[in-house]
Image: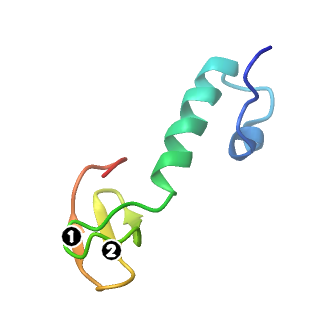
């Protein structure tokens, strides 16, 4: 059975192809999930913008990779 295309990519409709939308959806899902803070070690870090992350527990704001921490 084929993998389903993530719901966040439904906004593209029939454009760009299935494989491209699947890869984009996986990247987008990972970047919007919670990550571990390098300072307090809690799963409270969210991506603010490209390369800027902030922990919601200790309020540490730091730079890192553009997509995953």
Front position in the image: 27 or 42: 42
Quick one: label 1 or label 2, which is nearer the N terminus?
A: 2
* Image vertical order of residue 67 relative to residue 18, above or below: below
In space, the residues marked 1 and 2 are separated at their CA atoms by 6 Å
Mark 1, secondary structure of its residue: strand
- Residue 57 place in picture, x, y as percent: 36, 84
Q: Are marks 1 and 2 in contact (CB under 8 Å)?
A: yes
Residue 17 in view (yes/no): no
Dot 2 corresponds to which residue?
54
Mark 2 burial class by Cα count in 10 Å: few <14, some 14-19, many 20+: some
The residue at 63%/18% (across/down) is 19
Quarter placement of the N terminus: top right
The residue at 40%/67% (across/down) is 43
Quarter of the figure with residue 41: bottom left
Relative side of 12 to 46, left or right: right
The residue at 37%/47% (across/down) is 67
């Amino acid at each position: 059975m084929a993998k389903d295309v993530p719901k966040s990519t439904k906004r593209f409709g029939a454009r760009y192809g299935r494989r491209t939308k699947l890869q984009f959806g996986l990247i987008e899902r990972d970047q919007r999930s919670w990550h571990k803070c390098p300072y307090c070690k809690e799963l409270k870090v969210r991506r603010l913008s490209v390369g800027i992350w902030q922990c919601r527990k200790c309020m540490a704001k730091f730079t890192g990779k553009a997509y995953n921490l």
